[in-house]
Amino acid sequence: MTPEDLFREPEPPLSGTRHQQDLDVLPYGSYFEPPEQAAGYSYEETNSGYGGARYLEQHWAPGGAPYPGPATAQAPGHYAPNGGAEDPQGAPAPAEGPAQHEDPPTIELGPPIAPVPDVPEVHFPYPQPEPGEGPGPLYVIGDVHGYLDELLAALHQQGLIDTEGHWSAGRSRVWFLGDFTDRGPDGIGVIDLVMQLAAEAAAAGGYCRALMGNHELLFLGAARYGDEPVQSTAGTASFLAAWRLNGGQQHDLERLEPHHVSWLSRLPAMGIEDGHLMLHSDTTAYLEYGETIDDVNDAVHTLLADEGIDELWDCFRKFTKRFAFRGQSGTMAAQELLSTYGGYRVVHGHSPIPYLTGTDHPDDGTPPHVPGPYIYADELAIAMDGGVTMEGRLLVARLPLN
């Protein structure tokens, strides 16, 4: 069972054994597979240092050079090659075993932390392009869920960061689609890295932006409201209980600081770039919050600022819905969003591609095969969640995809 199923509106389950007749009603789409000579690496089996996912092509770097091994323990946002088989906390890598499709166990929760005060927003100037200079290339990144080393590897393979984890992409434009925390080992480390890259990209004339995912809403709710009860379709619940059941890690909550809360609270829910409508969730629930991108973003920010627990819970619940763009009505749903907010193609995360395509449990028991982003809904939608938490991959793609 996918964690979001635990607190959602009644609908068909997202995991479990799928019968063949279920696959007949799924949409026909296509995978985008970058040419190996362009990407500098191939889509082969990778290994995991955590057991919940595999390091994304950790042995390969642009140009075919061996990629440095997992990160050593040091300041967030930096890593160095060590070639070892231990994770950043020094824990030995587990032995290979059968693929696990359940979410990793969470750490026992302690008392909820106290609400944190707001801090001033920090603005970084964006250098203007030279006369006649066009914008840099556009990249999009799927759900990370705390897998910092996989993210560093993927960014390095695309040439977006150097071997020390610093921005190296000049005027490139990068969008993260949300869900930075939960399930994986270092959600706060992921947030620190994205904040660092935003500052470094701005100084280089590019930018690194991020969207608010449903896990950001859940994480902020858990930090602010703890075990305060809310009414849900599953009965009385709390943000803290839902966060734990959705893979929340206690060490992330303990390391959450005011500047993290301020940054997360200001993330937009939607954005548009070069005709690509950027969303986290593959749902039409955004339409309930406004008729323009600015209206939707303002509505979500107001929910977070006004500290209304039931309203925030309802927003979290709506943004956990999925699969709006698949099936016979999927194309119409994508068209409705595009006609309302603009753009010619929706780009989203949230729903792991193996769930979206019905291939989450291969018959031979191997991990799901995710060769790249998934284009579907008559080519109006691109799915970017490669299922890093279920032994898929963390996807970074340059747009447009043809």
Image: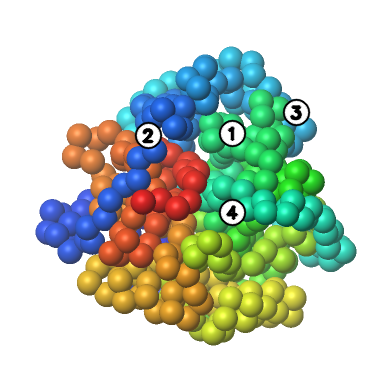
Question: Which residue carries the number 1 mark?
Answer: 159
Image spot of residue 332 (x, y percent): 31, 76
Check disc 2: other Cα within 10 Å, few if <14, some if 14-19, many if 20+.
few
Question: Which residue carries the number 3 mark?
Answer: 74
Query: Disc 1 or disc 4, which is closer to the eye?
Result: 1
Q: Which sits earlier in the primary sequence, circle 4 or circle 2?
A: 2
In the displayed orientation, state which residue is furthest to the left. 21
Report how far apart the C-alphas of labels 1 and 3 lie in the structure. 22 Å
Residue at image position (31%, 40%) is 368
Residues tagged 3 and 4 counted as in contact (Cβ below 8 A): no
Q: Can residue 183 be seen by looking at this rendering?
A: no
Question: Which residue carries the number 2 mark?
Answer: 35
Residues tagged 1 and 2 counted as in contact (Cβ below 8 A): no
Viewer-proximal residue among 245 and 127: 127
Check disc 1: other Cα within 10 Å, few if <14, some if 14-19, many if 20+.
some
Query: Disc 1 or disc 3, which is closer to the eye?
Result: 1
The kind of secondary structure element at disc 4 is: strand
